[in-house]
Image (tube, rainbow, N blue to C red):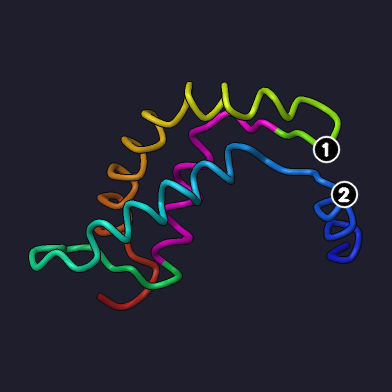
Amino acid sequence: MDDFKEILYNAGLENSAENLVLEELSDYVEKIKNEPNSQFCFCSICLADVAAIVLNALKPSYSSNFIDKDKRLKYYSKYRPQVQRKIIEAFGIVKKNPHHGK
């Protein structure tokens, strides 16, 4: 299945929701990870949990090279503020319930 998935992604299949969440999450982490009072864990387990929480709150939006690529920017504009809010909320949830030792 991984090979099949890779073939489709190489052909241009993408999930705009996933791209937006990962982009915004990366920006947010870069912004706050060096703050002296940051109370969040930035390990891959916690970041994956944050991403999953935010993605589950969004409507997926798939496109390919030829179908609906122009809708990606509209999707980003519409959902970016919601994603930014959800990332902050998700960090709070993960902080209270980490999947690793505290």
Q: Which mark is residue 18?
A: none
Q: Quadrant of residue 100?
A: bottom left
Rounded to the nearest whole Å, what is the CA distance between mark 2 and mark 1? 7 Å
Name of the residue lying farthest toward the left: 37
Q: x, y (%) of residue 8?
A: 87, 51
Q: Amino acid at mark 2?
A: Ala
Classify 64 as above or below 31. Answer: above
Check whether the beta carbons of the residues at disc 2 and disc 1 lie within 8 A of each other: yes
Quadrant for the N terminus, please.
bottom right
Q: What residue appears at the point 35 percent right and 44 percent down from the top-left corner? A: 87
Magenta segment range? 46-61
Q: Secondary structure at mark 2?
A: loop
Q: What residue appears at the point 42 percent right and 62 percent down from the top-left corner? A: 47
Q: Is residue 9 left or right of residue 80?
A: right
**Between 78 and 65, which is closer to the camera in this rendering?**
65
Residue matched to label 1:
65
Q: Is residue 28 left or right of residue 1?
A: left
Q: Amino acid at mark 1?
A: Asn
Classify 56 as above or below 74. Answer: below
Name of the residue lying farthest toward the bottom: 101
Q: Which mark is residue 11?
A: 2
Bin the neighbour count of mark 1 within 10 Å (Cα to Cα): few under 14, some 14-19, many 20 and up.
few
Mark closest to the chain's N terminus, 2 or 1: 2
Q: x, y (%) of residue 77?
A: 48, 24
Q: What residue appears at the point 29 percent right and 42 percent down from the top-left corner? A: 89
**Between 101 and 71, which is closer to the camera in this rendering?**
71
Q: x, y (%) of residue 44?
A: 45, 71
Q: Quadrant of residue 80?
A: top left
Q: What residue appears at the point 72 percent right and 34 percent down from the top-left corner? A: 62
Residue 20 magenta: no
Q: x, y (%) of residue 7?
A: 89, 57
